């Protein structure tokens, strides 16, 4: 496999057609070597239009969804970012090329270690990886951007409080087959919610369920 030509094909034939046109995002997707974040057993699928299995029953998102999430985050190089669900570390790496500082948490130490190794190989240093359960996590600070890579059944009321003024949260919300990626923007003590697009992703684990989801 010619990695560079296949990467270019992924960007031009999978990601661009979904209206991912921000040149900085496309440059980040071209710069970060996705194959270095894919488990070795699945390296041949690094640029395929499919989710890729990770340890602990997790998976890498499809490239097109990664591109769309990067674009709607509206990243700038002065931004601080929190990623909930480090997974392979690939999205964290892409975000780190577009933002100032990235903190990423994952429930599983195995995934944290995998991501840390891949980030070191890619010489990406403006990241902090933590093994932490989202349900009990308290960041002790606020961020300009927050991204959830897994779905939550309803908006966690802690999340807007973790945003700086004019901060932006991007999160898949709902339950399969009816999940929507939402943008939540903070303004003072208020926040607004905008539905962006539909998707289906793996839910975050150990997340409190609203009463309507409990059977």
Image: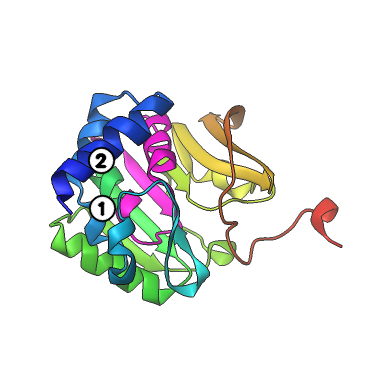
Image location (x, y in percent) of residue 98: 25, 38
Can the viewer see residue 3?
Answer: yes
Q: Residue at x 41, y 51 (%)?
A: 83
Query: Residue 52's image quarter?
Result: bottom left
Can the viewer see residue 75?
Answer: no
The answer to whether 205 is drawn above or below residue 31 in the figure is below
Image location (x, y in percent) of residue 8: 21, 37
Q: Residue at x 22, y 64 (%)?
A: 118
The residue indicated by pointer 1 is 34
Image location (x, y in percent) of residue 89: 32, 58
**Left or right side of 31 for 133:** right
Q: Secondary structure at mark 2?
A: helix
Does 42 lie within the magenta span? no
The answer to whether 25 is drawn above or below residue 44 in the figure is above
Asked if the residues shown at circle 2 and circle 1 are in contact, with their CB atoms under 8 angstroms apart, the answer is yes
On residue 196, the disc is: none
Q: Residue at x 31, y 73 (%)?
A: 113
Q: In the rendered view of the protein, which quadrant contains the C terminus?
A: bottom right
Q: CA distance from mark 2 to mark 1?
A: 8 Å
The residue indicated by pointer 2 is 29
Estimate how packed mark 2 is, as few (under 14), some (14 to 19) or many (20 or more) residues with alpha carbons within 10 Å: many
Bounds of the magenta segment: 62-91
The answer to whether 53 is drawn above or below residue 3 in the figure is below
Label whose residue precedes the other's in the sequence (2 or 1): 2
Estimate how packed mark 1 is, as few (under 14), some (14 to 19) or many (20 or more) residues with alpha carbons within 10 Å: many
Of 141 and 52, which appears nearest the observer?
A: 52
Q: Secondary structure at mark 1?
A: helix
């Amino acid at each position: 496999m010619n990695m560079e030509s296949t990467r270019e094909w992924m960007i031009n034939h999978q990601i661009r057609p979904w209206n991912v046109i921000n040149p900085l995002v496309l440059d980040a997707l071209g710069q970060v070597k996705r194959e270095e974040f894919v488990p070795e057993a699945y390296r041949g699928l690094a640029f395929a239009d499919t989710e890729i299995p990770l340890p602990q029953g997790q998976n890498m998102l499809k490239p097109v969804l990664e591109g769309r999430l990067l674009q709607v985050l509206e990243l700038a190089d002065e931004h601080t970012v929190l990623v909930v669900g480090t997974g392979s570390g690939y999205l964290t790496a892409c975000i780190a090329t577009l933002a100032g500082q990235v903190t990423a948490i994952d429930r599983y130490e195995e995934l944290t270690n995998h991501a840390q190794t891949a980030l070191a190989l890619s010489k990406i240093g403006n990241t902090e990886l933590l093994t932490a359960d989202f349900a009990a996590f308290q960041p002790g600070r606020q961020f300009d951007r927050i991204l959830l890579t897994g779905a939550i059944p309803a908006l966690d009321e802690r999340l807007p409080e973790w945003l700086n003024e004019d901060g932006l949260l991007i999160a898949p919300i709902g339950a399969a087959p009816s999940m929507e990626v939402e943008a939540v923007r903070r303004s003072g003590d208020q926040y607004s919610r905008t539905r962006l697009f539909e998707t289906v992703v793996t839910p975050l684990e150990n997340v409190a369920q609203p009463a309507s989801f409990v059977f």
